[in-house]
Image (tube, rainbow, N blue to C red):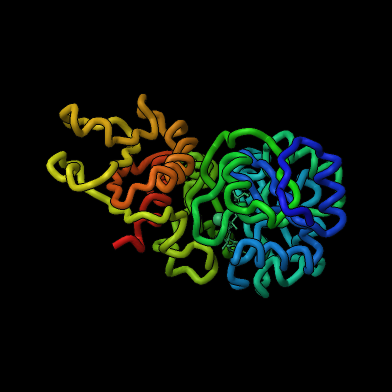
Amino acid sequence: MSNQTRIGDSILEASHLLKNGELVAIPTETVYGLAANGLNSEACTEIFKVKNRPFFDPLILHIGNKDDLNALVNEIPEHYIPLINKFWPGPLTLVFNKSEIVPDIVCSGGNTVAIRMPSHPLTLKLLKSIDFPLAAPSANPFKYVSPTNPVHVKDQLNGKISYILDGGDCEVGLESTIVKSDDGILTILRVGGISVESLMEFNPNIRLSIKPQDNPIAPGQLEHHYSPHCKLEIINNTAELFDSYDAIISVIPLKLPIDMNLRHKIILLSKSGDLSEAAQNLFKELRNIDIHGYSNVGILLGPEEGLGRAINDRLTRAASSKV
Ligand code: TXA
Ligand code: MG
């Protein structure tokens, strides 16, 4: 592997590397992934090494056609069908009982495998040009903020992989929503790019797992995750407190009258209060905190609805170890 990681848009080059068992960072509509041949145990092991990720945290397989599912799973739960029809390709990951061809390393030795069909056109083309699924976690070192453009990936993984497929900025900016099925009961293991409300339209009985960090089935849902290096704290919407922070991240515009001296401190994720826009900006702004070298940042969460739920989830996890 070369010392410098190259950024380019060659599907041919990406597929060549992947066929040779190498890692390539790929764009998806959610975040950039660190991809390897998902049927090649050695290549998948390399993902864990490069990310410094513990082996107990399983990987998501990405497919380019819905039909590719059949070889990877033992059965397709009936309740998944309307979700697959509606949300694939897109930011929804479903957990299945795995077939024999899925290597243990992908599933951390368990019987289930998480699968999604991403919608980014470049990655869909790439997936259609190879005859194996891509195992891909987010392309960041374990516990750091997920990357939403090729430069974010290079900043963190330069020299550790040879190629980043450049698909521009990620449209969604939050990882996929993960759903599992137990005897027909659907549970959301991770809130993400598809909102709970949208899923409920298709399955009113779907439930949210109570506290993801208590759930051994999604070990990647550690309480402390997505974290920049500075001290982060969730705060209440009271302007008196603002003075004690270097900066304040606010998901939506503040309702409080803020004096001009404090205004410069506020990093607003969406000026118009649009939660899709706030999601797109979230990880970029968390990275910017480190670039600016802030040491003490307050967080004002947004509304607990639609994508706001996933935004608040990521911000709360980012802050959780920062006490
Ligand atoms: O949007 C996304 O999902 C991105 C892009 C690259 O596709 N990927 C992503 O991967 O966020 P990662 O590895 O950062 O998060 C995957 C999550 C982890 O929390 C892991 O525990 C969970 O998926 N997971 C993987 N396999 C699972 C399984 N069999 N059962 C339950 N959870 C699983
Ligand atoms: Mg991740």
Name the residue located 83 percent from the left edge and 51 percent from the top edge.
17
Residue found at x 57% / y 44%: 152
- Please, is residue 124 above or below residue 94 in the view? above
In this orientation, does residue 87 appear?
no
Q: Residue furthest top?
A: 272
Image spot of residue 124 (x, y percent): 75, 39
Quadrant in which residue 224 is drawn? bottom left
Q: Nearer the viewer, residue 122 or 184?
A: 122
Which of the 4 image quadrants contains residue 27? top right
Percent x, y for residue 268?
34, 33
Point out residue 216 in the picture as x, y percentages from the top left corner.
51, 71
Quick check: 156 left or right of 159? left
* Count of number-bearing discs: 0
> Which residue is outermost to the bottom?
109
Answer with the quarter of the image where residue 127 lies.
top right
Front residue (pair 260, 86): 260
Residue 266 appears left or right of 158: left
Q: Decide if residue 153 is in sight here.
A: yes
Considering every residue shown, the one lying at the far front of the view is 3
Foreground: 22 or 191?
22
Q: Residue at x 71, y 44 (%)?
A: 164
Q: Tell me: residue 222, above or below residue 186.
A: below
Residue at image position (49%, 62%) is 221
Q: Quadrant of the C terminus?
A: bottom left
- Give the x, y percent position of residue 110: 65, 73
Specify the quadrant that holds the N terminus: bottom right
**Ligand 1 falls in which quarter?**
bottom right
